[in-house]
Image (cartoon, grey):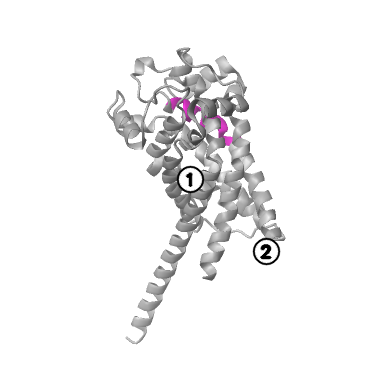
Amino acid sequence: SALAPQAGNGATMSTSDGMGSFLRDFLSGGVAGAIAKTATAPIERVKLLIQTQDSNPAVTSGKVQRYTSMTDCAVRVYKEQGALAFWRGNLVNVLRYFPTQAFNFAFKDSIKAVFPKYDKNEAFMSYLAVNVASGGFAGASSLLLVYPLDYARTRLAADMGSGERRFNGIVHCLVDTARGPSGPLGLYNGFGASVVGIIPYRGVYFGLFDSVKTLNPFENDHGALGIASKFCIAQSVAVVAAYASYPFDTVRRRLQMQSDRPRDEWKYSGIIDCFQKVARDEGIAGMFKGAGANVIRLVGSALVLVLYDEIKHVLNTS
């Protein structure tokens, strides 16, 4: 009987430690994501405008002229909508990104614990596969929870020209779409493409970073050299991950752009139809429109990974 309380206390301490670790992961990932997204919001808006313009009614109707380049897009947004317009949709992006990134990081370690463990020095490919799988499953799981906010982010950032906005805010966007022809399911248009794309993206993003960072001789250095080396690794990983999944991101955004319209006005009937029409009408390069701005934006993604490790280190030592 004397052992029972000790066993109970041990279980309680284990549960408490586990919850504390989860909350530290949640907070570290969310704060890092919010900072990085706000810093790179202007670049991301340019990327979204170029990526979605061929499915934007303002362009297809001839009301607004297409953007010809990243520079043309940035100059016209500044002239037509003002400097603050570069952060249009950033609030919902932060609201979306905090739980998304936080759940991705927090669930990644929890999911990884379910998989068998391998020594990176003895079975590196198995070690890498576990990291890729856990990152992919974490990303797909969190996406289900926050997809309507991702939809709102796309629509709020896709307004072109100096005319009246399609939606005047987050609530208007979500409510108006949910009351539209597709109902609440309209908020999940493009979700299938996102699920397919999120697995290679998050798998590579987290898996490669977790695996490659252990090979970094400055991994435990929290000074300038350590942070710089982690940033270079994170930047390389982010670029590879983004290009691996970018065509799926393009399809997702294109499908989101038609959610509030009747089905007979849709340009694309689904994921496969969208892939086929973009490839036929715009070439394979059409799948990568805005990718140039995306590479620049990925500085933010690399910053997220580095900030996450550093914030977590501070929380663990405090």
x 49%, y 38%: residue: 87
Magenta stretch, main secondary structure, is helix
Q: Residues within 10 Å of mark 1 (few under 14, many from 20)?
A: many
* Element marked by disc 1: helix
1 vs 11, nearest the viewer: 11
Percent x, y of residue 168? 36, 31
Percent x, y of residue 164? 39, 23
**Disc 1: which residue:** 139
221 vs 164, nearest the viewer: 164
x 70%, y 61%: residue: 218
Q: Earlier in the sequence, mark 1 or mark 2?
A: 1
Range drawn in magenta: 243-255
For the question of whether residue 293 can be seen, the reply is: yes
x 46%, y 21%: residue: 56
Q: Is residue 267 above or below residue 197?
A: above
Q: Is residue 164 above or below residue 239?
A: above
Q: Is residue 98 above or below residue 187?
A: below
